[in-house]
Image: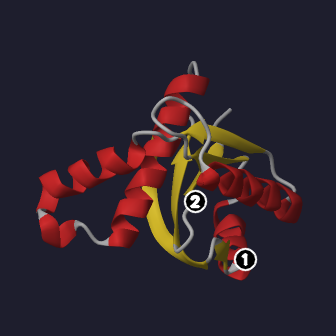
Amino acid sequence: MTKTLLAFDFGTYSIGCAVGQSITGTAQGLPAFKAQDGIPNWAQIEKVIAEWQPDLLVVGLPLNMDGTEQPLTQRARKFGNRLQGRFNLPVAFQDERLTTVEARSEIFSRGGYKALKKDKVDSISACLILESWFENNESGD
């Protein structure tokens, strides 16, 4: 059975978003959400959830390179818990240690510095979070 998933790259000023299907294991970036000190416009998130009807929400977990937590880790967990509470959907957390770096190099290789707009980085990070979740959790449907 094909599942639709939404992934979020949590940040204090911007939250990247991507959608993907388990059958393809790929993700496509959606517009990033603006956030004020980590708090998004929940109505915008609700609209995206209503549009895509996801079976699962995946939230990137920012960890230090050695795997330890950092201040943003707890905030990302809190964001995931709020998503679960508000929308009554299951939430999974995905280690995102390298996704922002990968996203920057991916964008750079495609379009140079001009392409490194913050919302693009966040949405590509969300795609990478979702694709790495698929790699680690789906053994094919």
- Residue 129 located left or right of residue 87: left
Q: Position of residue 76 (x, y in %)?
A: 66, 54
Residue at position x 72%, y 50% in the image: 77
Q: Nearer the viewer, residue 88 or 85?
A: 85
Q: Amino acid at mark 2?
A: Phe
Residue sitting at x 87%, y 56%: 88
Residue drawn at 24 percent across, 49 percent down:
106
What residue is drawn where x is 57% and y is 69%?
Answer: 12
Amino acid under label 1?
Trp
Tell which circle, 1 or 2, labels the residue nearer the N-terminal end. 2
Where's residue 63, x and y in %? 55, 41
Q: Which numbered circle lies on residue 42?
A: 1
* Image quadrant assignment for residue 94: top right
* Left or right: 44 as drawn, with respect to 19: right
The residue that disc 2 covers is 10
Give the vertical position of 24 relative to 71 (above or below). Answer: above
